[in-house]
Structures are given as C-alpha cells and as structure tokens.
Image (cartoon, coloured by chain):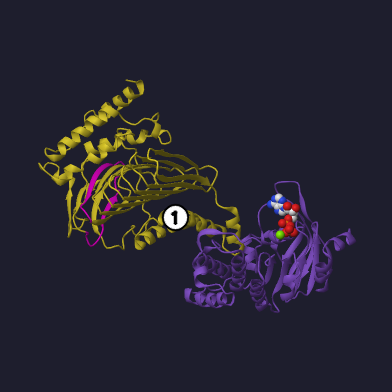
Amino acid sequence: MNALRQAKQEAAASLLDGATLPEAGGWSRAAREDALARLRAMGLPSKRDEYWKFTDPGTLTAREAPKAVTFDHGEPPVFDAIDRLKIVFVDGVFDAEASDDLSLEGIEIARLAETGSADIHWAGDVYGRLEARGQSPVERPLAALNTALAHDGVLIRVSKTPSRPVSLIYHHKDDSSDAMLHHVVKLEKGASFTLLENGPAAARFNKCLEVDVADGAAFHHVRAQGRDHERRAITHMFARLGEESTFKSFTLTVNGKLTRNECIIELTGDNAVAHVAGAALGDGDFVHDDTVFITHDAEDCESRQVFKKVLRNGATGVFQGKILVQPDAQRTDGYQKSQSLLLDGDSQFLAKPELEIYADDVACSHGSTSGAIDEEALFYLRARGIPEGTATDFLTLAFLAEAVEEIEDETLAEEIRGRLEGWLARRRG
Amino acid sequence: MLEIKGLEVKLEEEDKQILKGVDLSVEAGKVHAIMGPNGSGKSTLSYVLSGKDGYEVTAGSAELEGADLLDMEPEERAAAGLFLAFQYPVEIPGVGNMTFLRTAVNAQRKARGQEELSATEFLKDIRAKAKDLKIDAEMLKRPVNVGFSGGEKKRNEILQMAMLEPKMCILDETDSGLDVDAMKLVADGVNALREAGRGFLVITHYQRLLDHIKPDVVHIMSDGRIVKTGGPELALEVENNGYADIVSEVA
Ligand SMILES: Nc1ncnc2c1ncn2[C@@H]1O[C@H](COP(=O)(O)OP(=O)(O)O)[C@@H](O)[C@H]1O
Ligand SMILES: [Mg+2]
C-alpha cells in the first residue's frame, strides 16, 4: 500500500475514533456498517488526490467544524411564495413545530431517524446503495462518511405525482453546528416529483441525496444554498435513471467560504435524460466547486451540464466534470459547459472538463471558458444611458441566464432570477 | 449645440495619433454630414465624443450645449442628450431588446430628474415607433441585436434614437449594408426626428444616404482633420470625382 493511502486511512481512523453509528438496529445498520468499512478502506480525501487538487478538503474533514456566524439577509426566504410541503431542519435537527404534516397524496415521507431501526424498509434498496456504486472509479469518502453517520434525513417514496413539491428548509442558528443529513428519494414508474432545498443548514454541512428514478419517472430539483458567508458544505447527489426517465437539477449558490457539490449520475435505461445546472456567485472569501460525473450506460440517452460562476474579489471557482460513455451507450448525446465570469483580476476559475468515450456513435461536446465582462457590450449599454453598475449587472445576468433556463418551472426560474438580481444589486449598494 | 475645438486624439495603447485637430460646430436644427475615405478618423471622432475607452484626448475640447463632454462618463453624455448610432451595433446575448431599451429610457429620465415611464406608456410608445421602422414584435423580444440582419441592426439603432429622443444625434455609417428600401426606412426615421432643437452629425462614406437625409453642411475628413467644408454640393462632388481630388487639393 502506498504512503498516501496509508495516511488517508489513518486520518479516517482518527476521525472515526470514538464515533458511534446512530442508534440503528434494523435495515439501515448493514448499510451504515458497509459505508464505514468503505470509508476506512478509502481513507479521508487529501489535497494530493486527483479530484481534490483544486479544493482543500481540510476543513471538511477536520474533527471540529470551523465556526461560522449566521447571517441575516433580511429578505423573505427563497420559495416562500410557492405552495409546498415544508420540512424544516435547524442546524441539521428536524423541527417538527416548523414543519408541515408529512402526509401528501401519492407519496410517502418518513424520517431516517425514526425508521432506521425498522427491520425492513423500502429505502433499504437505495440508502447507501447508490452512494456505494458512485465510489468507483472516483472515490467519494465524505459521502461514505455521511451514509455511515448521518443522524437524520428524509426518505421519500413517490408512487403517484403529488400535488405540490416537497421543500427541505435548512436553518442555521448555532455558530459551531456540524450537520449531517442523508435523504433518499425513490420515484416509482411514471411518477414525477419536485424537490426544493434551501438554506445554509449549519456551520458545516455534509449532505447526501440519493435519487432512484424508475422508468418513465421525472425528478425535478431546485436548490438554493444559503447565503451565510462563513458556512462550509460538502454535498453529494447520486442518481440512477431508468428508461425514458428524466432528472433535472439546478443549484444556486451564493456566498459561503467553501461549497463542494458533487453530482454522480448513472443513466442505466435507454432514452433517459439528465440535466444538471448551477449558478454560483462569489464575492471575496469564497470557494465553489462543482464536481460532476455522468455515466452513460444505455442507448439514446442525453446528458447536459451547464455551470456558470460569477467571481469577484478573489473568489475561486472549480469545475470538474466528466462524461463517461460506456461501450454499449450508442447514440449518446452529451453536453457540458462550464464558464466563469471574472469580475476582477484577483478571482480565479479552475476547470477540468473530461470526456471518456467507449462507444463509437456518440455526440459529445464540452467547453470551458473564463472571461471578463465584454467591454464592447458594456460600452454599448452605457452609451444608451445605462449606468455602469446596472450595465454590468445586465451582462452578468445575461451570462447566468443559460444556467437558470435549465429550470423547467417558470415560477421557480423567476424566483431564482430575483435572487440573482438582488445579490448583484446589493453589491452595488 | 455641439462644439468641437482643436480636438486631438491618440490611441491609449500605442503611440498613434488619429485625430489631428478637429474643429466642428453643429447648430441646433441643422444636419451636418462628415464624409471621408476609410481610416480618416470618422468613427474615432464618434467614439471619443460618446466616451469609449482606449482613446486619449491630447488637446482640444468638445462641448454639448456648453457642457464639457470629455469630462463625463458615457452614460452621463447620453443623459445629456448625445446619441451615437453605431457603425457596428453590438450583439448582447441574454439581454432582451425591450428590457434594454426601457432601462435605457428610464435611466436617462432619472438622470435628468424626470419621472420614469410606466411599462404601459413605454410599450405604447415603442410599438408605434417600431411599426414605423417595420420592426416587428418578435424582433423586440429577442436579445439585443442577436440574430439581426445588418439592416435590422441599423433599424434597431434608429428605433433606439427615436425612443431616447436625444438632442444631438451622431450616425456612423448607418447606411452601410442597407439596401434601397431599408435605407429609405432609416432616412424616414431620421427625417421624422428633424426639428429645431436637435442637431445631427451624419457620417457616411457615400453620397447615397444624403439624397434622403438632406444635409445643411458637408465636411470632408481626411487623415484626422476636416479638410474641406461646404454645402450639399460638396457631397455630389465626392460622388462624381472621389476623394482623391479634394484631399490632394488641400494637401
Ligand atoms: N482601437 C484602435 N486600435 C488600432 N487602430 C485604431 C483603433 N481605432 C482606430 N484605429 C485606427 O485609426 C484610424 C481611423 O479609424 P476610424 O476612426 O475607424 O476611421 P473611419 O471611421 O474614418 O474609417 C485607422 O487607421 C484605424 O485603423
Ligand atoms: Mg468608420
């Protein structure tokens, strides 16, 4: 065994020293123990790992969560005006008072903390399973850590399309909270479902979402990661897509010292469609990392990645995106775009786009760019009387538009646009 | 209206003098034309007047109704009443034509201490003006100049001019790339705006446009200077004999 592996394993052992698995005697016990074994074997991520070169995992793997003061932005929370079933967590702890009743026709919602010790549960087919599949060829130890130790989360089974979305709301109150949640969503054949997520969650947040999309089902996901400036987050989203199914996910990230969003999708049924998009806005002490891995393992599937980042005052953006096309995945349509708009010379964008293709009949493209505001366009707008600040915002929003357009629901898209405008306007004072 | 005196301009990045002492005065209610060979500095003059980066004014002055233009930001010049119809209108993906124009109109009104136009007032106004220029609703909805033909871009410039109602209009080769019908539309658009309080500076390479927009004064620019000034007949002289004669005559 090489020295790096050994050091990583030792780091894992030391982090796990004294840690106990959440009280779980039933179905989730085996999944948690397996995850623990995976983690011990992989070890913790290190700066020397290929996929951690750009983002230092140090504060994510530290024993104690670095403190993060909460930030009151004084605006109504995102999605406030949308009719939805609300499930609230405060610093990662379920808040029954603030949450709605967990019943909604067509779906079944349970809490991980309450069902973990049942002997049999439908979530057993998914919990930790998709995560385990997603560990190869790239290791994701912090997801295994999550599967093993997550103290709560929601398990959602969708058998018929419900009348409204489920909204997970993550409040952050305690400066040193360290939260770990693990959610499972299982869509039965032909069902569609929208999941919303918002809020900073905790000083440090480790979240894992596993989504199993059966044939003909459609999953929509819009998330707005909270605005706290000092928060840190590592999130994983693992998805498996059946035949003719759809998976569409959009993430808005503003602020935060460190955010790494990993997205691992496997298209396993023919004619499946997966779109993942993100808009990230960072000003100053901000590192935002999108790490995406999409595997085409069936014919005639489409995948699309659109990631845009606006960076200023020394903010850092990272994009690591891969499309892997397996030998049988003929007529794959894979698209990947990652772009950053650097509003000053101090900010940086580090990108690693990758294509690995083993089928012969495929159309895949990727493009990664990094640029400043278009001076010609800026002058044109100003020459018509639009002040420089407003003109810059216009061009910034125009840059982000392509990512936001990935949100299918126009009301949700408008909600996100409003947030982007607000963020930019506040920075102009 | 527009008073330019001894204007000398060099490129900021390199040691290249482009305008070598331009004197020009456009009175309210008048149309002045500037003609001249390619590369003589016509576009540079229009850019410097409207505040584009990359140029350094080394001598001279430019005033709009007594206000020092060169001391203002581009948006302040626009609010003061200066308008440039670009030789090459810029495409701006992601910014809707309507939103752009409404923001521009209201930003100027705000800067001048006027009340902003309501969405309805603005819509009514733009629909009427777009119709005159044969710009359809679909074009208004598209991103600024994206997917527009050359002629559509130029008509869009005139629409912006009509909406912004500037005091001093500079048109930089608005005729280039236009067929006869489009040129007529553009000229009608310009002529409709001619009035006692408004000045025009029409930059053109050919005499053609001046058949439709009758100038009061014609200037010939060559190598960064106005080398000859005359009446509309000067444009005809250029049309018949080219620039060579005039330029060599003064050299
Ligand atoms: N940004 C620039 N960089 C380099 N050369 C320029 C620039 N702007 C103008 N010039 C030069 O200045 C001269 C005048 O150009 P321009 O004003 O465009 O002339 P016109 O509009 O009369 O054709 C030309 O020689 C042109 O190449
Ligand atoms: Mg020119």
Question: Which chain shows up in purple?
Answer: B
Location of residue A113 (image quadrant): top left
Q: Name the residue under label 1.
A: A402
Question: Dot 1, crowdedness within 10 Å: few (<14), some or many (≥20)?
Answer: some
Image coords of residue A189 (percent x, y): 21, 53
SS for dot 1: helix
User: Toward the viewer: A223 or A1?
Assistant: A1
Q: Give the range drawn in magenta.
A: A161-190
Identified at 63% across, 66% down, the residue is B78
Color of chain A here?
yellow
Image coords of residue A79 (percent x, y): 32, 59
User: Does residue A15 appear to the left or right of B11 in the view shown?
Assistant: left
Location of residue B24 (image quadrant): bottom right
Identified at 18% across, 58% down, the residue is A106
Q: Quadrant of the N terminus of chain A?
A: top left
User: Does residue A325 appear to the left or right of A152 in the view shown?
Assistant: right
State yes or no: residue A171 in magenta.
yes
Q: Quadrant of ligand 2?
A: bottom right
Is residue B56 in view? no
User: Toward the viewer: B200 or A210?
Assistant: A210
User: Does residue B25 appear to the left or right of A41 in the view shown?
Assistant: right
Location of residue A38 (image quadrant): top left
Disc 1 beta carbon < 8 A from ligand 1?
no
Identified at 38% across, 30% down, the residue is A49
User: Does residue A312 appear to the left or right of B76 in the view shown?
Assistant: left
Is A34 rendered above or below residue B50?
A: above
Image coords of residue B217 (percent x, y): 79, 72
Q: Which amino acid type is marked by label 1?
A: Glu
Image coords of residue B202 (percent x, y): 72, 68
Is residue A80 in view? yes
Residue farthest to the left? A119
Q: Which chain carries label 1?
A: A
